[in-house]
Image: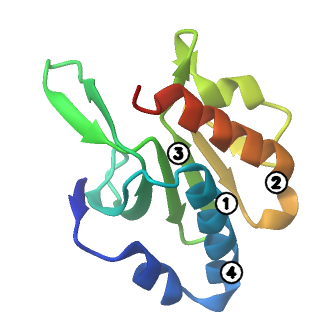
């Protein structure tokens, strides 16, 4: 995947109503915590081999297993075919921050650094805000 010139707000505006409203609300919430940080679109082939469009908030970099420096986002938001994905690439005490929130976010699916759910109705938004605020604090430039 790579950062593109696609405008994230324009992308959100063209999403179908059934998911666009939830994405717009999540974008507003994440943007509140990432005020002043870059917000950009990432597009292309994702790890699992599928083509993706992800709104990225903040900048992050890491060195992959082959020693290559990789630019990435801190938090990513994606509208999938049947669900919403949020990627949280913040680490706390040696593990992905999202792992500390298992069992607290509602009826959601949690991977190592990914959160998946069908609609905002199943997500505890107060805990989500806490997660995003913590991700920003852990990754804010000093």
Rounded to the nearest whole Å, what is the CA distance between mark 1 and mark 3?
14 Å
Give residue 23's quadrant in the image.
Answer: bottom right
- The image's colouring method is rainbow
Image disc number at residue 29 = 1
* Cα distance between the residues tagged 3 and 2: 16 Å
- What's the mark number on residue 87? 3
- Distance, label 4 to label 2, CA atoms, is 15 Å
Horizontal side, residue 141 vs residue 96: left or right? left
The residue singled out by tag 4 in the image is 21
Left or right: 137, with 25 as reference point: left
- Kind of element beneath mark 2: helix
The location of residue 137, given as percent across then percent down, is: 57, 31
The kind of secondary structure element at disc 3 is strand
Work out whether mark 3 precedes mark 2 in sequence or the reverse, and give the earlier one: 3
Is the Cβ of the residue at disc 1 closer than 8 Å to that at disc 3?
no
Of mark 4 and mark 2, the one earlier in the sequence is 4
Horizontal relation, residue 53 to residue 76: left or right: left
Q: Tell me if label 4 and label 3 are in contact, CB under 8 Å.
A: no
Q: In what element is the residue under mark 1?
A: helix
Closer to the eye: label 3 or 2 = 2
> Considering only order in the chain, which callout, 1 or 2, is on the residue closer to the N terminus?
1
Q: Determine crowd level at label 2: few under 14, some 14-19, many 20+ residues with C-alpha closer than 10 A.
A: some
Residue at which label 2 appears: 125
- Label 4 sits on a secondary structure element that is helix
Viewer-nearest residue: 111 or 8? 8
């Amino acid at each position: 995947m790579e950062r593109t010139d696609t405008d994230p707000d324009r992308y959100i505006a063209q999403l179908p109503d059934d998911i666009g409203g939830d994405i717009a609300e999540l974008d507003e919430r994440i943007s509140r915590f990432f005020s002043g940080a870059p917000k950009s679109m990432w597009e292309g082939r994702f790890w699992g081999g599928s083509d993706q469009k992800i709104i990225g908030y903040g900048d992050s970099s890491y060195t992959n297993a082959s020693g290559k420096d990789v630019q990435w986002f801190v938090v990513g938001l994606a509208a999938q075919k049947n669900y919403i994905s949020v990627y949280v690439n913040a680490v706390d005490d040696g593990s992905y921050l999202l792992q500390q929130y298992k069992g607290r976010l509602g009826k959601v699916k949690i991977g190592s650094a990914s959160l998946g759910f069908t609609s905002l109705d199943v997500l505890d938004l107060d805990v989500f805000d806490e997660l995003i605020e913590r991700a920003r604090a852990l990754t804010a430039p000093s």
